[in-house]
Image: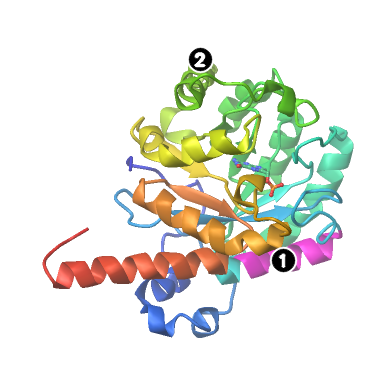
Amino acid sequence: MTDAPAPTCGPSSDKQADCARTQPPTAMAGLADRCETSPRAIAVPIAGAERPVIMGVLNVTPDSFSDGGRFAASDAAIRQGLDLARQGAAIVDVGGESTRPGARRVSAATEQRRVLPVIEGLRAAAADLVISVDTMRASTARAVVQAGASIVNDVSGGLADPDMLRVVADLDCDYICQHWRASSDVMGDHAGYVDVVAEVHAELQERLRAVFAAGIATERVIIDPGLGFAKQRAHDWALIGELASFTALGHRVLVGASRKRFLAQPGDTPVDRDAATAAISLLAAKAGVWAVRVHNPMATVQAFSVLDCCRDSARVLGHPR
Ligand code: PMM
């Protein structure tokens, strides 16, 4: 875990996170009810934190693979964003363009028409909530940061828009640089690797050189191996097994496994994958990952509570884990 700075807004106190952190496993049912029901303040990603920050997924799209269409209307999306925060998300990641396999790009105008009212609504309802925006466009990045977002989540790592890195450097906001090879409609054609872990490392390092050359500060950067992006199932699992090699690079690391196809069981639907997602969140915690991006924060909060209780018990017994 690096000395990770907080996103640039809001206070560091977080009563709900403290509440979640201190619940024993037997008390986990109804955890959210016992925590404050108001939207959460920022859970600052602190150095040496023992559990990752939770980023809740809010897709304001008609076609995302898991929640596509459910939150396409702004008021429903704002309600869902606040609910993600109540469940335990310290960050809400708003997306206006689907990146599911096969998805086609939408125009900048469409993307911004979807996300801006939601960011404004969330900002008005929860002044301290950290808002991230999932966009590959510099113009959208500029508009959303002006509207109150603190993090630009660029799944293309600056490859989709030649202006992105310069604009992010200018905005001086946090930047998620994800491993990416090609846009979603053709990424399946680019999912060939000899050594996926080595190649994702090398390609991310190349992106980081471009990120720093553009003037983005090191402490602003969060890296992401890009599970499901130009990856086959076996590639995703190989990356999961080597998460610690990414955290060893010294940057904050974000992992987005939630409900993805590599977690699928025969005959399931994406919402059936929340338990598997929570299990990945635990592996991510063990690897020192900074944040996990999930659709169901409560499942991951419960998984983290198990980990906390395990650690607390080990400390009491004098065998810290
Ligand atoms: N996955 C999706 C979208 N955005 N952003 C980051 N940083 N990492 C991811 O793994 C990621 C992402 C696709 O999943 P969704 O359709 O459920 O949002």
For residue 80, say whether it is visible. yes
The answer to whether residue 172 is seen in the rendering is no
Q: Secondary structure at mark 2?
A: helix
**Quarter holding residue 210:** top right
Q: Is residue 50 above or below residue 226?
A: below
Residue 60 relative to residue 307: left or right: right
Task: Give whichever of 161, 170 is nearer the camera.
Answer: 161
Three-letter residue code for mark 2:
Ala
Label 1 neighbour load within 10 Å: few <14, some 14-19, many 20+: many
Q: Position of residue 241 (x, y in %)?
A: 42, 40
In the image, 122 versus 34, the foreground residue is: 34
At a point 81% along the width and 30% down the height, the residue shown is 185
Does 74 lie within the magenta span?
A: yes
Residue of label 1: 80
Please state the horizontal and vertical placement of residue 282, each as a whole percent of the image: 42, 57
In the depicted structure, whether residue 201 falls above or below residue 41: above
- Quarter of the N terminus within the rendering: top left
Q: Position of residue 34 (x, y in %)?
A: 49, 85
Mark 2 surroundings: few (<14), some (14-19) or many (≥20) residues within 10 A: few
- Residue 207 in the image: above or below residue 4: above
Q: Amino acid at mark 1?
A: Gln
Mark 2 highlights which residue? 213
Q: Is 237 inside the magenta-drawn segment? A: no
